[in-house]
Image (spheres, rainbow, N blue to C red):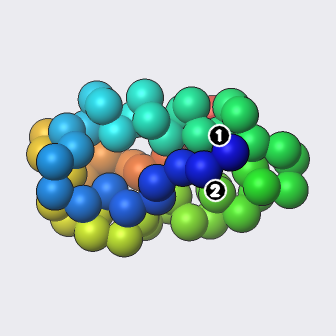
Amino acid sequence: MESCIDAGAGWDWEDWKEHRDEMLAGASPAARELLLGLLDGPPAGVYVEGRDDRPWLDPAA
């Protein structure tokens, strides 16, 4: 499985959350742990539209 962790320009918050959740749901337990670390401040995240400083990860993650 290949996924993009770069949250750069072109993403809006709702689409990014859906993408993030799909990546996490499809990952093995070891990959999920790695992804959680990477997604808690993804590269170029400042460009995601509509995030309004909400946490990168769902508290239930």
Give the Cα separation between the discs numbered 1 and 2: 8 Å
Q: Of circles 1 and 2, which is in front?
A: 1
Is 29 left, or right, of 9 in this rendering? right
Q: Residue furthest right?
A: 29
The residue that disc 1 covers is: 24
Specify few, some or many for label 2: CA neighbours under 10 Å numbering under 14, 14-19, or 20 or more: some
The residue that disc 2 covers is: 36
Does 2 sit above or below residue 41?
above
Report the residue at 34% width, 39% height from top: 16
Does 21 sit above or below residue 57?
above
Report the residue at 77% width, 55% height from top: 31
Question: Do labels 1 and 2 touch, CB within 8 Å?
Answer: yes
Report the residue at 74% width, 50% height from top: 32
Q: Position of residue 34 (x, y in %)?
A: 71, 63
Residue type at mark 2 is: Leu
Is 12 left, or right, of 23 in this rendering? left
Report the residue at 25% width, 38% height from top: 13
Residue type at mark 1 is: Leu
Q: Residue furthest bottom?
A: 43
Q: Is residue 40 visible?
A: yes
User: Closest to the observer: 58 or 35?
Assistant: 35
* Kind of element beneath mark 2: helix
Q: Position of residue 27 (x, y in %)?
A: 75, 42
User: Closest to the observer: 56 or 31?
Assistant: 31
Quadrant placement of the C terminus: top right
Q: Where is residue 54 in the image (x, y as percent from the top left)?
A: 30, 46
* Kind of element beneath mark 1: helix
Does 59 sit above or below residue 44?
above
Quadrant placement of the N terminus: top right
Does 44 sit above or below residue 57?
below
User: Closest to the observer: 49 or 57?
Assistant: 49
Q: Where is residue 41 in the image (x, y as percent from the top left)?
A: 42, 66
